[in-house]
Amino acid sequence: MHAVGCPGGLAVAATANSARPWHEAWAQAQVNEFYRRNSPTDHFDTAIAHADRIAAALMKMLRETTARMPGSAGITVVDLGADSGQLLRQMYRINAADEHPIDHVRWVGIDLRPRPFDLPAHIEWWTGIAPDVLRLMAPEGICGMVIAHEWLDDVPCPIVQRDDADVVREVWVDSVTGVESLGPKLDEDSPQMQWLHQWWWPVRYRGEIGLSRDVAWATVCASLNVGTAVAIDYAHTREQRCAGDFDDGTLVAYRDGIVVRPVPDGSANITARVALDSCAAAASPSQLMQQRCVLDEPRWPLPHQAQLDPHRYAADFQRATAALTLRQRSGRGDFWWLRHDVGLRRP
């Protein structure tokens, strides 16, 4: 491979037999290897570990959605990248325990992995790549809710970086070693460069092109006949990107709960934050909300309850502490919720 030096220890590749664009290697590693053998929760603490809080907020949204739906069509709730079905299990329990439950709900999980052996029979399971399997299994569309919880951050996207001549190039990677090199420069008239100019400019050093996430989200929203699509994810805003808060990009990998160097060999979960504001523009109208503004305040037990019922006090305190982690800044409170409604009556 012939190369010339550039900042950051990368090389500009004239030929690279073993390297290819990052998003291609990422897709190969995730779809064909990692997700077919692993659960993401085995490798990092997803917010779904607090599924009861997330499920409660989603059930509140689902009730409001069903109240605004015209007619009496059956309700379907689809969870993309459902993992072990934790979120759907919690939503079902909350609905079943409600004094006025939503009737005749169809619960569907979609994931690359086979149906979990312990998944309750009332939850359907579609195995495949979302949203492709959604179009295949529900060609008539969905009436109800489609949930993309920490799904868009796993949609592979191109990685770009400036070279020593200040030219924006796509980053290539060796799938075995993880060694990176700089590939061809981006064409000024390409959709990728246009996306950068609109959503992440200037690129001072490194960044990600979220066009594939925009397309994925727009496809999910297009699967709705009537109802609500909601995406929940680690995200950043155009203001933050343009201010330089993410000049090194956000690509990261997790293995066994530890942050490791991203190598697209299928041994770790590779992810990058989502430009949800760009996704919102791809499926308009949409509503973008910070998670700390969506979830209810934690309910802390009163001090005197520690003497009256120590075990309950400890359990309530633990639940409130867990709920607080979903609202903390520089943590899961930095999650954003993106909501897109189709065919609903005005509230």
Image (cartoon, grey):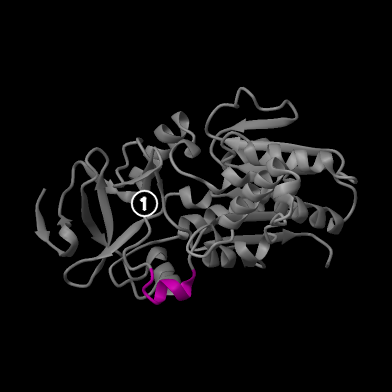
Q: In x, y percent, where is residue 72?
A: 90, 48
Q: In x, y percent, where is residue 246?
A: 37, 67
Asked whether 244 falls inside the magenta stretch, the response is yes
Q: Residue at x 83, y 53 (%)?
A: 66
> SS class of the residue under badge 1?
strand
Q: Looking at this view, is 85 or 134 the one in front?
A: 85
Asked whether 315 falls inside the magenta stretch, the response is no
Q: Quadrant of residue 93?
A: top right
Q: Looking at this view, is 156 or 85 the one in front?
A: 85
In the picture, measured across the screen, residue 37 lies left or right of residue 82, that is left
Check the image and name the residue furthest to the top: 117
Q: Is residue 139 visible?
A: no
Q: Residue at x 67, y 68 (%)?
A: 285
Q: Is residue 116 visible?
A: yes
Q: Is residue 119 above or below residue 234?
A: above
In the picture, measured across the screen, residue 278 lies left or right of residue 161, that is right
Q: Looking at this view, is 71 or 300 the one in front?
A: 300
Q: Which residue is mark 1?
A: 252
The segment highlighted magenta reads 237-245
Q: Looking at this view, is 335 or 281 the one in front?
A: 335
Q: Amino acid at mark 1?
A: Val
Q: In x, y percent, where is residue 98?
A: 85, 44
Q: Residue at x 53, y 38 (%)?
A: 129
Q: Residue at x 65, y 53 (%)?
A: 320
